[in-house]
């Protein structure tokens, strides 16, 4: 059976599934139950500096987006960092770590941009026996307005400066948690790497308004007639998070820094995808908040079974395996041609593919009087839209044309594999100059 144990920057855990810093890791009671349920590690809910406790709103703090079946797709929150006393958290962390020495216990931190504030809290955390710290440069609401969280994560110089303070005042492994609310996430990642961070984690939540109450004319969640932006997470953010993981994993300036992947991980497959793109482990919040701690059992068994099927004996065997396959558009094979094919035995004649292709794609699906739908190869541009709107899994597939076959739409004969052309070789590229490409250098 595949070995799920993970060594992430020297922090060992029985599996790569950690709970992200959030309500699931807010207190000893939760974390003990999470470990008993099978989670490999936790990043404790973010601690702030000593002082008057943080005050949260006492009205609703969540907004949500649902699919048609009411499955939660995206969650928005306006919660702040922990509102429990610092010493209470530290005492609990110490007890938990003592009782679970083989599980990962990382402590998330967010204090003002002052060297002494970081020095003080690091000294106190090191007394707990925790395995490492995660610097929360990500929360986009409440704390950002106080000059912390994403206000730091959006300024690479601050990210670098605080990372250097943390490395100066602590021997604990340091993970820098990045905000997605930035144009280029590789910039703060690079600042973290250059200043000694042991790893980066991404993503924290995305600035968002999930809904507007049209009776009250107010964004939700509503707090006494007013609303504010929150942080978005859950399955809806996974594509954004995975792209950011891939960007950091493949850019020469940031490649090699260990990455903890966060954002919408709900199943073992989500985790495997993040890890294939370069994440050394994953962190989970919304899925645990939606389905409870026990989902980790399915995550572990699913990942282990898939690894067995693929012949992977440890997670290291597939971490980053998909990274080299992420490229820029100009490197894609423009002589690669596919055509949609409809399996008439599976088709339920709903007509969705026809409507989509006829109205918004290339008028490449024919509908007969008795509602039989067929693809016109001489019109199909292989956009894949019909596959995505068809309600029957596997009913429409894309067939790849082989070298020597003729594309009925363009009349082009598919060239031999070695003769394929990308945009860089394509005759329509003005003088074939790579410099005419919009994006270069990766
Ligand atoms: C209610 C709530 C509170 C959160 N609090 C924190 C926090 O204190 N510190 C932090 O670094 N991230 C916090 N997060 C962000 C999560 O750790 C995680 O980065 C984000 O939810 C994306 O993961 P997910 O899609 O699995 O939820 C919070 C998320 C939620 C939903
Ligand atoms: S792949 Fe695109 S162009 Fe071809 S049939 Fe489907 S929707 Fe139409
Ligand atoms: S969308 Fe799928 S099921 Fe519906 S008509 Fe097209 S091929 Fe058939």
Image: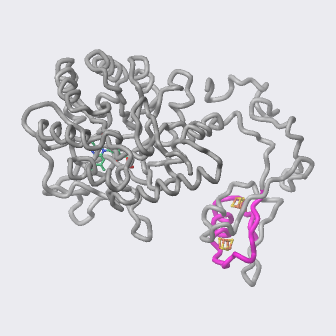
Between 381 and 422, which is closer to the camera in this rendering?
422
Q: Residue at the far left: name it.
A: 52
Between 213 and 186, which is closer to the camera in this rendering?
186
Q: Give above or below for 234 relative to 176.
A: below
Residue 175: x %, y % from top left: 36, 30
Q: Residue at the far top: name it.
A: 168
Q: How many marks?
A: 0
Image quadrant of residue 112?
top left
Q: Is residue 96 magenta?
A: no
414 sits to left or right of 1:
right
Residue displayed at 70% across by 66% down? 396
- The span shown in magenta is 339-366
Residue 74: x %, y % from top left: 38, 56
159 sits to left or right of 69:
left
Residue 373 can be seen in this image = yes
Q: Is residue 364 magenta?
A: yes
Residue displayed at 80% across by 30% down? 425
Q: Residue at the far bottom: name it.
A: 370
Residue displayed at 87% across by 56% down? 408
Residue 433: x %, y % from top left: 74, 23
Image quadrant of residue 431?
top right
Image-quarter location of ligand 3: bottom right
Q: Give above or below for 85 relative to 299.
A: above
Residue 265: x %, y % from top left: 44, 51
């Amino acid at each position: 059976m595949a070995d799920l144990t993970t060594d992430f920057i020297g922090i060992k855990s029985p599996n790569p599934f950690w709970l992200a810093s959030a309500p699931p890791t807010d207190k000893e009671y939760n974390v003990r139950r999470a470990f008993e349920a099978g989670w490999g590690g936790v990043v404790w809910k973010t601690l702030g500096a000593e002082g008057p406790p943080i005050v949260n709103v006492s009205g609703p703090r969540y907004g949500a987006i649902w699919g048609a079946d009411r499955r939660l797709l995206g969650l928005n929150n306006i919660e702040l960092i922990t509102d429990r006393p610092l010493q209470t958290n530290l005492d609990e962390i110490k007890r938990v770590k003592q009782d679970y020495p083989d599980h990962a216990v990382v402590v998330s931190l967010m204090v003002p941009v002052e060297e002494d504030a970081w020095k003080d809290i690091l000294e106190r955390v090191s007394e707990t026996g925790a395995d490492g710290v995660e610097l929360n440069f990500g929360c986009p609401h409440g704390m950002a307005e106080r000059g912390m969280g994403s206000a730091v994560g959006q300024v690479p110089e601050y990210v670098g400066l605080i990372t250097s303070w943390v490395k100066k005042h602590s021997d604990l492994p340091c993970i820098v948690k990045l905000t997605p609310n930035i144009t280029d996430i590789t910039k703060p990642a690079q600042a973290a790497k250059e200043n000694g961070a042991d790893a980066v984690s991404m993503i924290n939540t995305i600035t968002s308004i999930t809904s507007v109450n049209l009776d009250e004319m107010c964004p939700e969640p509503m707090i006494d007639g007013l609303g504010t932006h929150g942080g978005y997470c859950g399955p809806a953010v996974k594509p954004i998070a995975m792209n950011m993981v891939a960007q950091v994993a493949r850019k020469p300036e940031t490649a090699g820094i260990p990455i903890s992947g966060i954002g919408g991980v709900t199943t073992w497959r989500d985790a495997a995808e993040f890890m294939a793109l370069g994440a050394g482990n994953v962190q989970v919040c919304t899925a645990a908040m939606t389905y409870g701690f026990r989902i980790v059992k399915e995550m572990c068994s699913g990942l282990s079974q898939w690894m067995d099927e693929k012949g992977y004996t440890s997670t290291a065997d597939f971490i980053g395996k998909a990274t080299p396959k992420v490229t820029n558009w100009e490197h894609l094979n423009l002589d690669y041609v596919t055509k949609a094919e409809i399996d008439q035995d599976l088709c339920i004649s709903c007509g969705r593919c026809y409507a989509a292709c006829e109205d918004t794609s290339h008028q490449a699906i024919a509908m007969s009087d008795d509602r039989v739908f067929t693809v016109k190869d001489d019109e199909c541009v292989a956009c894949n839209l019909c596959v995505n709107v068809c309600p029957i899994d596997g009913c429409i597939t894309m067939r790849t044309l082989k070298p020597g076959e003729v594309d009925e739409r363009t009349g082009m004969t598919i060239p031999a594999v070695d003769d394929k052309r990308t945009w860089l070789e394509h005759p329509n590229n003005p003088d074939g100059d790579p410099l005419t490409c919009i994006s270069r250098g990766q």
